[in-house]
Amino acid sequence: MWRNIASNAMTFLVVVVFLFGGLLLWAQNEYAAEGPLDQAICLQVDRGSNFSRVSGDLEGQGAITSGMIFRLGADYAEKSSQLKAGSYLVPEHASMSEITDIVTRGGASTCGTEVVYRIGVNSAEVQVRELDPAQGRYAEVLEFDPAEEAPAEYAAYRDDVGTRFRVALAEGVTSWQVVEELGQVDVLEGEIAEVPAEGTLAPDSYEVSRGDTRASLIERMENAQEVILAEAWQNRADDLPYDDPMEALTMASIVEKETGNAEERFLVASVFVNRIERGMRLQTDPTVIYGITGGEGVLGRGIRQSELRAETPYNTYVIDGLPPTPIANPGRASIEAALNPADSDYVYFVAKTLDPADGHNFATTLAEHNDNVAAYRRLEAERANQ
């Protein structure tokens, strides 16, 4: 009898182990299988949340077939303690394994509402955008000038716990402009003790959190520019007319202000390098303008002849070589162009049309350049007569 009992118990145990193994294999397959979502969704993970709440939300939105398997899978993958707050785009048919990775890897949020504080060369603006998960595109829902009174609905977007924030710096902004406009960003705190050295802030888009300090954001911008400049300096071309990286940064800022056409930055840089190597003055208007404004805003008028003749450290019609500092904060592309200019014989350039996006005509001789200038003047005259 005892032998039969032992035999039956062993059989039962084998069956249980077999069933458990099969159940485990099924659960693993379910965890890794294509999910039921037919359309992407935004998943909001609040601070202090846990996998139980997240799994309930995912079940409610039809993103997973089993909250229990989702939680067990996260436990088995040792990710249940790595949940990150944020708003995340969950793509269609994402598996439970993929969703676990999305909500635990961290980094910038990828879905929901965002407020972008844009600092441009000529203006600043605040944009409120929402991601349409089905289309995978942001739609602008609100825009205003930060110097003016914000629309009433802005506060609701700003104060929503799921909203994220970015500060976007355009290439060519001055450090003074950055400091002035950061003072208008109402989710940041604290003061900036002094205007950072010109050229030392990297134009980019920076994700910030409510309560971050302005000084800490400036430090991030400075650190980013240091890395960009150091890398470009390390990979620079031979025999450039710069004594140190700061001179290269100064050249990059001039290139940045002279052209918004990404394709011709390297050619513009070659013109200025060629002029220095031939003992010619740079004769570039943006440096003259910086000498007038000190980087504090836009000149808003043409340069006077008296200003072109004035002996200032930034008047490259009068001084030899580079001005003493950068005249703006150049982006990565202009820094790389200054340190790896195109191989050309050009020493002149002038705008092709009245639209800056159309780029420039380049010339190797003064006669050719004068022809290009004459063509440009004719365009100016035609517009004036319209």
Image (cartoon, helix red, strand yellow):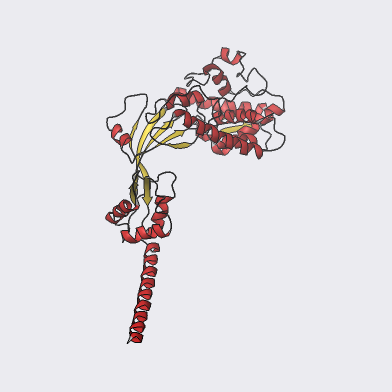
Q: Is residue 368 visible?
A: no
Image: 292 above or below 270: above
Residue 88 left/right relative to 303: left
Q: Quadrant of residue 34?
A: bottom left
Q: Nearer the viewer, residue 284 or 59?
A: 59
Q: Nearer the viewer, residue 84 or 379?
A: 84
Q: Quadrant of residue 100?
A: bottom left
Residue 48 left/right relative to 123: left
Q: Quadrant of residue 351?
A: top right
Q: What's the residue at 70%, 33% (across, down)?
A: 240
Residue 383: x and y in percent read 46, 25
Q: How many marks?
A: 0
Q: Nearer the viewer, residue 64 or 52?
A: 52
Residue 166: x and y in percent read 42, 36
Q: Is residue 185 visible?
A: yes
Location of the C terminus (image quadrant): top left
Q: What's the residue at 51%, 22% (across, down)?
A: 195
Location of the N terminus (image quadrant): bottom left
Image: 100 above or below 109: below
Residue 85: x and y in percent read 37, 45
Residue 141: x and y in percent read 32, 38
Q: Nearer the viewer, residue 3 or 155?
A: 3
Residue 82 left/right relative to 328: left
